[in-house]
Each structure stands twice: as structure tokens, then as C-alpha cells.
Image (cartoon, rainbow, N blue to C red):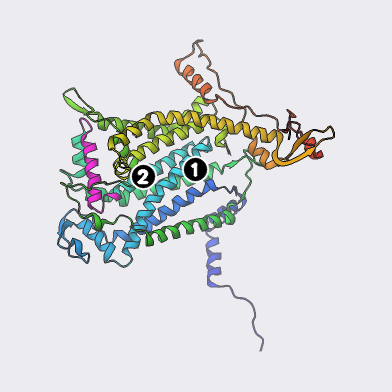
Amino acid sequence: MPVDRRVRPSVTAHLSRLVSRTSAGRRTAALRDELRMRRAPLHWTNLFGVVAIACVVVLFVTGFILMFAYAPSSERVTYDGPYLPLAGAEMSKALRSTLAISFELPGGLLVRQAHHWAALLLPAALILQLAVTFFTGAFRRPRRVSWLLLFGLLITALAGGWSGYALPDDMLSGTGLRIVEGIVLGIPVVGTWLSALLFGGEFPGRIIENLYPIHVAVVPALLVVLIAARARSAYVSGPVQFAGPGRTEDRVVGLPVWPNVAVRVGGLFAIVIGGLLLVAATVTISPVWLYGPSSPGDASAGSQPDWYTGFLDGALRLVPPGWEVEWLGRTWTLAVLVPLAVVGLFLLAVAIYPFVEEWVTGDHREHRILDRPRNEPTRTGLGVGALVFYGALWGAGSADVVATHFHVTVESVVALYQGIVVAGPIIAFLLTRRICLALQKRDRDILLHGYETGRIVRLPGGEYVEVHARVDAAERYRLAGPAAIRAEPAHPAEDGRLRLGDRVRAALARAFFEDRLQPVDDGDPGGGRTDEAIERGEPSRQAGAA
């Protein structure tokens, strides 16, 4: 009897053929083919975005689980759970449900701690991504909108972390909310109204009920929208890359996005999620059972906010005492207004910097080749100065802890951070710019003369010289130095006058391009070796004598 040995298609293969015939299937296939043709460079600077996405996924999954067990209510109840030190204590339903998640729900503590650790890692990944984008010049056209979206993601993550920080309603979060109330009340004219709107009356009011919708609805929706918009912007503008052989503004050297890069991204994504779960299972974070319930009349000593909001607390601590003035029949609390204004201006400067640099330099071209930070000393100096300023504010947020641990007075610690905030960014800017220039000169020397090998040879004339190793093609691209750009001078308007804005822009352009080395021909003999000399194995004519 004949046997039919034909391989019959599986159910999944049959469904795959059916889906591929639909319009959605055809669009998916076209997208897959396009991703196979598109190339993406491999560099460690591309990793922070994957880390941020992994944190967002962990936040969404764990937050969805916690929603079913958490009670967003300020109503007072008596604790009768398994944690005996708090037995009979009066607390809110929010804290009672948080304790139930930690001690009574199977796996609840793991989920809660994974949620908290992901919330701590997300701002770090976004800040590092902002720093990499800034120092490499990846914010220039056509990616200025992408920079704003990334900055918006950071602000949204900070808002989400702060709103979630208060939801357990323990003593630590209650102390932080009391500080927030004082800041809001210090705003002239509208402070009292804003406080009543935020807290729903006298402190603590209904702050839990007001923050919960922000944390579980507004912030996640903004994160999804911003991530989708940034992904679309990145897809439209295309990848960026560092200079190298075969790499131009129109040609990208790298691996296919699908499946090569996608598999690598998926691997890092899984590693980050696994690392977060491992840390959540082994390292305790936010032990609310040790802090106890929140009390409007009490505050925990040595309380510290989560690290990503420490710079806001530090800005308040650095203001000298007694900064108040009477004006227009009202008390203007400069101790609150000045830090708010300084931090607000700092964040605004970060957001609009790409537009300011383009206006100053007059460079309106589209860029797909990244800069080495040393080749843009002014931009790099500004970035390091901003990091020093942020770091000083962040460190000042723990001035009391520093004082107790190192047995010094709080006043001396605050005075130290005040000096760093004022003078630190200026010193960092000047020092960084000089270091960048020195690194450029070193790269030029290597480009012209090659690498030192330590091998000494004697020439026929009796001279001893050191043979330098040849610089390969890829290294030549890396060491080529900054592009030849000159400051755009101020041009008179149609009436023949130089406007003030044009004069300011021209002066800033001259300062921006100050101490900038001009590129050189790496084959220039200039005391070094030409390409022909390298091929013949001749030693450097500028090598040091033994």
C-alpha cells in the first residue's frame, strides 16, 4: 500500500501564510525587509537606551501587579498584620496595604523592590544617555527634536519617581511631603492656593489620593507617548556613527538591524531585567516597616530623598539663612524662590542647548558623524561644568549625613558646597578645555609620527633613532581631529547696521571656536614620516635620540 510521505504544513505555517496575505502582514514584511537592509553601528554609547527601555518594562509589569494589592487611601486603620513591632499602630490604608504586599502577598516584596530598583535605574540610564548625546554632538540636526523628547523622558521619570516615593505613606515619604509643602507655601501670591490644590486641604490632606492617578495613569501615558515619538524620530533620522573608513554622512557601516542588532538588543534587554530581579531579591530597598507610619507632627532624622531628586533638596540647603524681603505687602522667601529659579534655568538651558549652539555657530547642516569630545573643547567644557554644578547640588542634599559621618560641622559642609556650586563649574570649564586641547595635540603628534615602539635603531650616519609604528586607516580617521570650521562673523542688516543680537552671536562664536586646532594633512612630512616612508620602513625623522 503506497505511503504518502509529503510533509504537511503545520498549523502555525498555515496561519503565517494567512497573516502574510493581509495588509498588516504585507506592511510587516516590508518593514522587516527594510530593517534587513538598514545598517546600525555597534558602540557602547548605544546601550543606555536599551537599559532605559528595560527599566520601563519592569516598571509597567510590576506596577500593574501592585495595582491590585495597593490601596490609595489616607483613611486611618489599626495594623493587625504579621509584623509584630507595628501591631496596634494607627496608620493609613496605603501603608497597611504596602505592609501586606511586603509580608503577606507571596512574592510581593520581590515585585515591590523590583519596581523601586527599576525606578532608581531609569533616571540614571536617561542621564547617561543625555550625557553621551551631548558630548558626541548627537543632538544636532536632524535630531534636535529627539533631544527634547529624551529630556522630556527624564523629567517624566523624575515626576513618576517622586509621585511613587510618597505613596507608601511611611515616615520617610511623609517627611519628604512636608518639605514639598513648605516649598509650595513659599511661592508668593499663589503658594497657599497651590498647596490646597496639591494636598486637598491642610497637610497631609488627600495627597495619596491626588498622587495616585498621576503615578499610575499620567506618567505611564507620557512615557509611552515620548518613547514612541523618540523611536519614530530615531527611525526617520537614521543612525549616527563615529568617523571611520567608509563612513560618511550618507553611508552607515555596521550590522543589519534585523536580525543581528535586534538579537544583541534583546540579549542586553534580558540581562538588565535579570539584573534588576537579582538585586531586588537580594538587596533591601525602602524598608517601610522600619520607618513606621507617617505623622504630620514628626520627621525622621537624616532622611534622604531618592538619589535622582537629591539635587533639588541640595539647592534648598545651600541658600543662606534669613533670605526674605518685604515687598508689595508680601513676604518674598528668597530661600525658596532662588533655588527654584536656579534649578529651573539650569533645566531650561539643558533643554534648549542644541538650538543655542546652532544659533551661535551658524551650523545648520545635518550631521550623522559624531564628534569626539576632545575635538569640541568648548562644548565638552560646558558639559563638564554642568555636571560639576549638578554634582555639587546633589552632594549638598546629604550635607547633614556628611557632617555626621566625618564629624564636621554642617555649616562647614554647606560652605564647601556653596563654593563648589559657584566656582566649580568655571574651573571645570577652563580645565576641561585645556585638557581637550592637550589631547588634540597628542593625537596630532601620533598622526604625524606614529606610535612609539621602544625599538632603537642606528642609522648609517651613526644616529640613533626610535622606530615609530604605522597608524592604520581606522586610527587615522579617529585621530584626524576637529573639522575645519570658522566662526561666522556678524553681518550688517539691510540698513547697514550691526544689530546687538548679531554682535552677541559673533562674540559667542569666537569664544566657542577658541583654542581649536585646525586639521592637518596626516601625510605632511612636517618632521614625521610620509606614507611612502612608512611603506619603505624608514624611521621617523623627528624621533628622539637615544
Image position of 489 (left or right of 543): left
Q: Nearer the viewer, residue 400 or 105?
A: 400
Q: Residue at x 14, y 62 (%)?
A: 88
Q: Which residue is mark 1?
A: 233
Quarter of the image for the C terminus: give it: top right
Q: Which mark is residue 462?
A: none
Q: Give the amino acid type for the residue marked by disc 1 in the picture.
A: Ser
Magenta residue check for 536:
no
Q: Which residues are magenta?
A: 164-189
**Mark positioned earlier in the residue sequence (2 or 1):** 1
From this view, report whether residue 144 is shown above or below residue 275.
above
Residue at screen point 35% across, 62% down: 110
Type of residue at label 2?
Answer: Tyr
Question: Mark 2 Cα within 10 Å, few/some/many (few <14, many 20+)?
Answer: some
Q: Residues within 10 Å of mark 1 (few under 14, many from 20)?
A: some
**Depth order, front residue of 145/86:** 86
What is the secondary structure assignment of the residue under circle 2? helix
Q: Secondary structure at mark 1?
A: helix
- The furthest residue to the bottom: 1
Residue at x-position 35% and y-position 33%: 416
Query: Could you tell me if residue 440 is visible in this image?
Result: yes
Q: Position of residue 330 (x, y in %)?
A: 17, 26
Q: What secondary structure characterizes most of the magenta part? A: helix
Indicate the position of residue 358 as horizontal and vertical percent values.
50, 29
Q: State the residue in front, 307 or 153.
A: 307
Q: Considering only vertical position in the picture, is 527 above or below 22?
A: above
Q: Which mark is residue 308?
A: 2
